[in-house]
Amino acid sequence: MSAVTFNDVSRHFGAIKAVDAVSLDIAEGEFFAMLGPSGSGKTTCLRLIAGFERPTAGDIRIFAQPVQDLPPYKRNVNTVFQDYALFPHLNVRDNVAYALMIAGQGRRERYRAAQEALEMVQLAGYDLRKPSELSGGQRQRVALARALVNKPRVLLLDEPLGALDLKLREQMQEELKSLQRQLGITFVFVTHDQGEALSMADRVAVFDHGKIIQTGTPEDIYFRPEVPFVADFVGSSNVLPAALVAQLAGESRPASIRPERLILGAEGRIRARVTGLSFLGLATRVSLDAQGTRLTALLPQDAPRPAPGDEVGVGWNADDLHLMTAGAGA
Amino acid sequence: MHSDRAPLTLKIAAAAGLLFMHLPILLIFAYAFTTEDQSFQWPPPGLTLKWFAVTWNRPDVWAALGLSLKVAAISTAMALVLGTFCAAAVSRSRFFGRETVSLMVILPIALPGVVTGIALRSAFSIAEIPFSTWTIVLGHATFCVVVVYNNAVARFRRTSGSLIEASMDLGANSFQTLRHVILPNIATALLVGGMLAFALSFDEVIVTTFTAGQQQTLPIWMLEELVRPRERPVTNVVAMIVVLVTLLPILGAYYLTRGTDQVAGQGK
């Protein structure tokens, strides 16, 4: 069954088309990522599901129920906000139990539920602290417990890891993933970080200018981008312009190739000049200029390294070149 | 070289400044205990507490005090309602002329009291509204609203907008959100604004003289007493009471706003 369905949903702010005729279908129990640069409409889509925005056109369903006329407090959907939005005047326990207090549950009952939710996010014992006394990572967990305490059918996460440092972010990625598997709730999360989207989600929708450009599994998005924008935005693939592909493969369509699949040597399919080298630890990134087309190659540490200014041949296995449909930026 | 100790000249200047500001007030207090009731004679020929009893038995003092408290209470209540709504509208939504509205709300406190007073007086007479307690209240509300508005707007600005969305998201309707999230977050700001408004209203003279008609608020009564002396030290006793009644809320406001610089609902 579909958890969330968008049918040609638009949200326009005056002349600005924040979300423009988007259709999507999120399955029950799915971990779904909305990926895109800022201003691409992904957050507005999330707010449309939560009910903070009403669509200008189109039809939104949550578990087959049309919701475009339901206010946020009548939707069985909860949100983890980007800034967490914890209530500063309430302690951790009352923050987590807020939804149950509003629902009219008794004190004992709701405190027990809050306790369980806090244990689930490994924050047992923090009940009486104020949000201002917690670290960023702890606030995030409280926000998560607060959103989950009422057992929503869909959990929305707005840039959930944006404010955390790298190490904490990686840890939370795994925890979120296992929490989602354990609860079986549909998670929909918004991010501008392609690594985050690829590592956590079952499926990713890539947004640009209010539209969904491509939807697919992380592997689809990463290895088989359909348009140059996706190739470039997700994992900075090399995009070969249609004219160059026409010479090489006989088809006038842009193509993408992963940086780690480029082979540098004396021979090659095209010639390029090395414009820069940077050491990344596991690999060395080589910037290349092939008659105006900028390419990036990732060389393993043990491969021979060219020097800046060298002329090299650039080759690849034919299978690694992925032809795309001509899209914006081709 | 920088020294932690202030130089002697600076200390003397500071002491002189403080004396200049506070000595006259202490003189007023001292005269409340003098035995001389015709003129201000220094030093007082003798000390007595009888003026407190005399004041206690003067009905005109009670009438003026009662009116002042009533006016201050009503205008503070009006200011709390109007000021909070204004602040919420200005800080929560964007609309055409928002900055203008904000300026217009603040303007009355910058306007000289004489101008406000004359304007209100002529407005009342054009509209043929007879002077009453309510005309005084209206006059006071013009500046009380500003005080509440300023406090509330500052708090709203520091309260994250996503708190309201979070509350709605968790199942609370608008009324529940107001009661459980908005009011607790702006409560101290409203208390402070209300206290300041009360203190301002309680000792207001200028606007009141134009809008009071025959009634006397406490400050007006004191002004009259100074012109036509009768049992002069009674005025001093009343002055002490006025100082206390206005000082306490202001001190309270000061203590309540200390340490609330932290931004409410901020994520990091």
Image (cartoon, coloured by chain):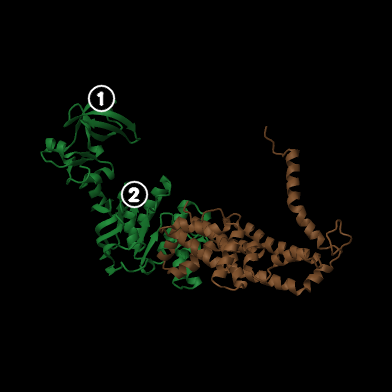
Which percent across, then down, holds residue B108?
56, 59
Q: Which mark is residue A310?
A: 1
Compared across the picture, whether A188 is left or right of A141 comes to: left
Closer-to-camera residue (A291/A11):
A11
User: Share a chain, discs 2 and 1?
Assistant: yes
User: Disc 2 residue type?
Assistant: Ser
Rendered-image quadrant of the C terminus of chain A: top left
Helix, strand or loop at label 1? It is: loop
Identify the residue at horizontal 83%, vertical 59% (top origin). B40
Instruction: Say above or below: B181 vs B260.
Output: below
Q: Which residue is mark 2?
A: A38
Which percent across, then down, holds residue A278?
33, 32
The label nearer to you, 2 versus 1, is 2
Q: Colour of chain B?
A: brown
Real-space Cα separation, disc 2 to disc 1, in angstroms:
38 Å
Identify the residue at horizontal 52%, vertical 66% (top origin). B82
Q: Chain of mark 1?
A: A
**Residue B73: quadrant of the picture:** bottom right
